[in-house]
Image (tube, rainbow, N blue to C red):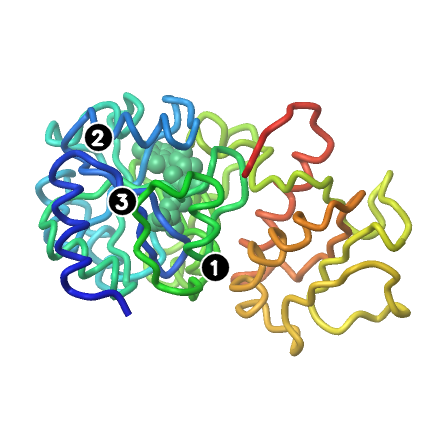
Amino acid sequence: MISAEAIAKAAKQLARGELVAFPTETVYGLGADARQPDAVAQIFARKARPRFDPLIVHLKNREAANAYADTRDPRFWRLSERFWPGPLSLILPKKASIPDLVTAGHPSVALRVPRHPIAQALLEAFDGPIAAPSANRFGCVSPTCAEAVSEQLGSDLTVLDGGPAEVGLESTIVSLLGETPELLRPGGIPEEEIEAVIGKIHRPGEEELQSLSPGRQKRHYATQTPLYFWGDRGAPEPASDVGELHFGKPDRPSSPGPVRQLSQAGDPKEAAARLFQAMRELDKLDLRAILADKLPETGIGTAVMDRLRRAQAAASDEGEITCS
Ligand code: TXA
Ligand code: MG
């Protein structure tokens, strides 16, 4: 466990305008004081993230939201009551206290209260808003452990080590800007549970999504190794240099290549928690390709499939990215 001194030191670093990576229940975040544009600029530089992609602002509790956003929307209070602290980000009209750099010039801001005890302790000690994207290089797989952060972003960065992330993929993002709420990213809280609180949510198609949420590229969460679903056109046959990402117990004969099984019991929650780590592990084996199972798209299975589809889209794209 991280000491109180380490938390206090990290809070001071944030106050000085430095970056600190910290664990949340979803993935590790790369944090900076959201009120200091120079500090926020370092986030974009360190991640090689384009400036058009806005950041999520992390808060210690929901009352803190009043200082940074227009919180008059009753849906905000109903959702934050039910799901905060936790893996849900809510988009509201922003106030002038949040610099434009944080929101990439948008008049709205994404807010989230994380439930990881180290994230909460850091927010408490810092006593201010922390802008934090996932602590990976832009377009790459999000880090679910401290080592993955250092590998991608450099060993000189302060990383608070909170062990493996519990949820394993990012927060669900819901925009409350319009009359009908919109799902900008499936994630840690299944959208069915959100609909039970505020009614029907609109799920924008891929095209609409690009205009609503600038960071939601079709190609993202990319492994360096091309990833395919079983049965995809162009997918390789199983071979010793083809990795396999199994959801539960496979119904196929034994695999000649390296295998990562996401959940022995076929539990989508467990699969979500293990997904990014398994992708990273297979990616390090210098394989020709990775073959992935599909999951049923209900509950958190929707978020797992969203990440896998984007990783697959990256495989069929020519652009090169370097993730470590
Ligand atoms: O679980 C999480 O949400 C993690 C942890 C660290 O909290 N953070 C995270 O941040 O995933 P990031 O930057 O990797 O993803 C944030 C997404 C981006 O796709 C961005 O486009 C979207 O949130 N976003 C942020 N502010 C927005 C806004 N005002 N309007 C629309 N989309 C926004
Ligand atoms: Mg990210």
Instruction: Answer with left or right where residue 4 lies relative to residue 233.
Output: left
Q: Position of residue 158 (x, y in %)?
A: 29, 46
Instruction: Answer with left or right where residue 45 lies relative to residue 136.
Output: left
| Residue carrying label 1 | 168
Residue type pointed to by label 3:
Val
Instruction: Answer with left or right where residue 88 lies relative to residue 48.
Output: left
Q: Position of residue 45 (x, y in %)?
A: 36, 26
Q: Are marks 3 and 2 in contact (CB under 8 Å)?
A: no
| Residue carrying label 2 | 39
Q: Which numbered marker is on residue 20? A: 3
Q: Residues within 10 Å of mark 1 (few under 14, many from 20)?
A: many
Q: Nearer the viewer, residue 140 or 199?
A: 140
Q: Residues within 10 Å of mark 2 (few under 14, many from 20)?
A: many
Label 2 residue SS: helix
* For marks 3 and 2 on the same chain, the one whose residue lies earlier in the sequence: 3
* For marks 2 and 1 on the same chain, the one whose residue lies earlier in the sequence: 2
* For marks 3 and 1 on the same chain, the one whose residue lies earlier in the sequence: 3
Q: Label 3 vs label 1: CA separation?
A: 20 Å
Q: Residues within 10 Å of mark 3 (few under 14, many from 20)?
A: many
Quarter of the render that holds ligand 2: top left
Residue type pointed to by label 2:
Ala
- Name the quarter where the C terminus is drawn: top right
* Residue at (32, 50) in percent of width and height: 159
Q: Position of residue 57 (x, y in %)?
A: 25, 42
* Residue at (44, 57) in percent of width and height: 145
Closer mark to the observer between disc 2 and disc 1 = 2
Q: Position of residue 196 (x, y in %)?
A: 38, 63
* Residue at (43, 45) in percent of width and height: 183
Compared to residue 18, the image places residue 187 above or below, namely below
